Image (tube, rainbow, N blue to C red):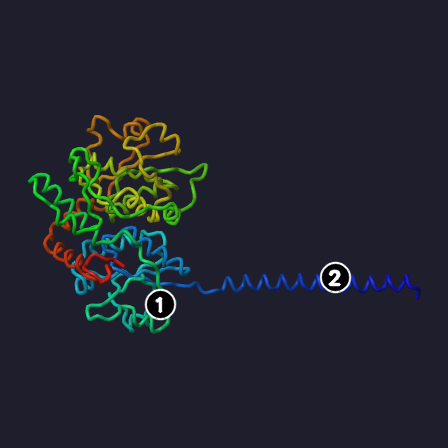
Amino acid sequence: MSSYEAVTETKWVVTCMVGGVIVGVSLLGAYSSQLWKSRRRNKKPVRVYMDGCFDMMHYGHCNALRQARALGDQLIVGVVSDAEIIANKGPPVTPLHERLVMVNAVKWVDEVIPEAPYAITEEFMKKLFDEYKIDFIIHGDDPCVLPDGTDAYAHAKKAGRYKQIKRTEGVSSTDIVGRMLLCVRERSIAEKNHNHSSLQRQFSNGHSPKFEAGVSAATASGTRISHFLPTSRRIVQFSNGRGPGPDSHIVYIDGAFDLFHAGHVEILRLARDLGDFLLVGIHTDQTVSATRGSHRPIMNLHERSLSVLACRYVDEVIIGAPWEISKDMLTTFNISLVVHGTIAESNDFKKEECNPYAVPISMGIFKVLESTLDITTTTIIRRIVSNHEAYQCVAKTNFHSDVSPNTQGMYFGT
C-alpha cells in the first residue's frame, strides 16, 4: 500500500469515527432532551401553604402572598375562621365571607381553605401534608405566638417543612385602624376644636398636616402621611407586565378604592367580565380629599394602587387618574366601555354640574353595574367606630407593647 493510500484510508477511518461520535452525541442529546421533558411533565408541583386572618386586607398581606407563591408552584391559603379569631385575638372587622372574597381575588393565590385553625396542630399539619399535598408551610419573619406563649409554627419547624418570608415594612392593620380612629377624631375635633395630640402621637402612620402651623383645615390636601415608600420595583412586582392586544375590548372603571374591600373586588370582577382587559383609574389623594372630605383617604395613592394591582381581575391601573374622563383619555387608552357601580360613597355624579362621566355618556359607552355587595369604605370605618372603645383599648396596648406587631391585638392578618 502506497503512502497516499495509507493516508486516504486513515482519513476515512477518522471521518467514520468522528461521524459516529457526532451521531452518538446527537442521539444521546435527543434522548436526554426527551428524558428531561418527560421528567418535567411528570414533576410534582411544589405546593406551599400560608395561613392568616387577613382582616382588613391590605397590600402588606398581598406582598406576603406574593413572596409565598414565589417559593413554590402552587399557593394554598388558609383563612382563619371568625370563631378562631375571636378566641385568639378578638372580633374581626371583616367577617369570614368577605375575607374569603378578598383572598380568592389575590392573583398569586391558587386555592383557599376556609375556616382554617389559628394554630397549626400536629393533626392539621398531617391533613395539610396528606390531603392537600403541601410541601412547605410559610410564614413571615415576625414571631407568631399563641396565647399560651408557644410558637404557632413549632410543629412545622420541627418537621423541617417550614419556610420564612420577609414582612412588609411600613404597613400594619393596627396603624390602619389608627388612621381610621384619627379620621373620626379629626372630624370631631374640627367641630369641637379640641386637642387630639395624644391620639395623633399614638399611631406612627397617623399624622395630620391640617393641624400644623400655617396649614388650615380648608387648605389641607389630606389628613395622614404614610411611612410607605413606593419603589418602581415593588410596582413591577405587583404588575401583570402585559398590555392590551390590538383588538382588546378595554373596560375602564375609576374610583378611590380606599381601604380596598370585598365590595371593590366584586365590582371589579363584574367589570372584567364585560371585556378582555380591565383598566382601573385610581384618583389622587387631593381628588379624594376634595370630593369626600379632608379626612380622606385613609390609604395614600400608592398604597391604594398596590392593593388594586394585586387583584386578579385587574390588568392595569392609572396611578393618579383624572376626575373627569375626557375624549382624549378615551382615545389614548383605546377605552371601549366606562363602568360605575351602584354602591359607592356618592352616586350623585349625574346631578353634578360637571359630571365626570359626561363624555362617555354622550358617546354611548357608559354603563352602570349593579353592585353585589353593599359595602363602602364608610362601612368599614363604621364597624371600627361601633366598637370604638374596645379597638382603642387594644390599640393602646399594642402601641406600648414590646411584642412583635403581628402577635398583637386583633388587627393582623398574617
Q: Which residue is mark 2?
A: 19
- Circle 2: element type: helix
* Upstream in sequence: badge 1 or badge 2: 2
User: Residue 287 falls in which quadrant of the image?
Assistant: top left
Placement of the N terminus among the 4 image quadrants: bottom right
Left or right: residue 413 versus residue 316 is left
Nearer the observer, disc 1 or disc 2? 1
Q: Residue at x 16, y 44 (%)?
A: 183
Q: Residue at x 35, y 67 (%)?
A: 162
Q: Is residue 374 visible?
A: no
In the foreground, 182 or 37: 182
- Circle 1: element type: strand
Q: Which residue is mark 1?
A: 162
Q: Residue furthest right?
A: 2
Mark 2: give few (<14), some (14-19) or many (20+) Cα within 10 Å: few
Tell me the kind of residue under disc 1.
Answer: Tyr
Q: Is residue 28 visible?
A: yes
Tell me the kind of residue under disc 2.
Answer: Gly
Left or right: residue 30 versus residue 96 is right
Residue 85 x/y as whole percent: 20, 62
Mark 1: give few (<14), some (14-19) or many (20+) Cα within 10 Å: some
Residue 27 x/y as whole percent: 66, 63
